[in-house]
Amino acid sequence: MTIIARTTISIRLPHETKDMEVRLCAPEPIENGCWRCRYEIDWPDYPRNFHGHGANSMQALVLSLQMLGAELYASQAHKEGRLNGGQGGYGIPVPSNFRPDLVGDDAKYL
């Protein structure tokens, strides 16, 4: 598992603010010619390791990025305004149905 991209997002907790790292791994081939692309979010209470699948490495990469962005924007921490990725957004693409929820630079550029 090779990490190809990472960013840090801060999360405000009841008594402190913590940084949580978000990582994206290189797509890897799996059975039947498909590809998997893993991602990780270091949520303070429940670190998350998940992945997207695609028919090729590019599709797996794009779908994983969108899943990652959707997970951040759908999180309770985002809804409560407790996440900060700088510039008011997270710099991670989302599926089109999440675009109305984008904030900061994400709303301008994604």
Image (spheres, rainbow, N blue to C red):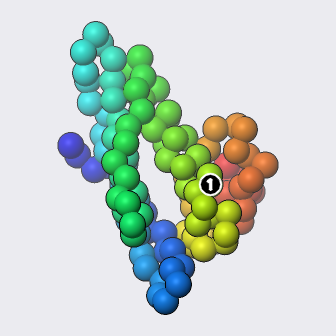
- Using residue 43 as the reference point, say whether residue 1 is left or right of it: left
Front in this rendered view, residue 33 or 72: 72
> Which quadrant is the N terminus positioned in?
top left
Q: Position of residue 61 (x, y in %)?
A: 43, 35
- Using residue 58 as the reference point, say whether residue 67 is left or right of it: right
* Number of numbered markers: 1
Characterize the local packing of mark 1: few (<14), some (14-19) or many (20 or more) Cα atoms within 10 angstroms.
many
Front in this rendered view, residue 3 or 80: 80
State the residue at coordinates (39%, 69%). 44
The residue lying furthest to the bottom in this view is 15
- Using residue 76 as the reference point, say whether residue 23 is left or right of it: left
Residue position marked by numbered label 1 in the rendering: 73
Is residue 92 something that shows in the picture? yes
State the residue at coordinates (33%, 17%). 34
Q: Position of residue 95 (x, y in %)?
A: 64, 38
Q: Quadrant of residue 86?
A: bottom right
Q: Position of residue 4 (x, y in %)?
A: 32, 49
Q: Position of residue 76 (x, y in %)?
A: 60, 61
Front in this rendered view, residue 42 or 84: 42
The residue lying furthest to the left in this view is 1
Q: Quadrant of residue 19?
A: bottom left
Q: Secondary structure at mark 1?
A: helix
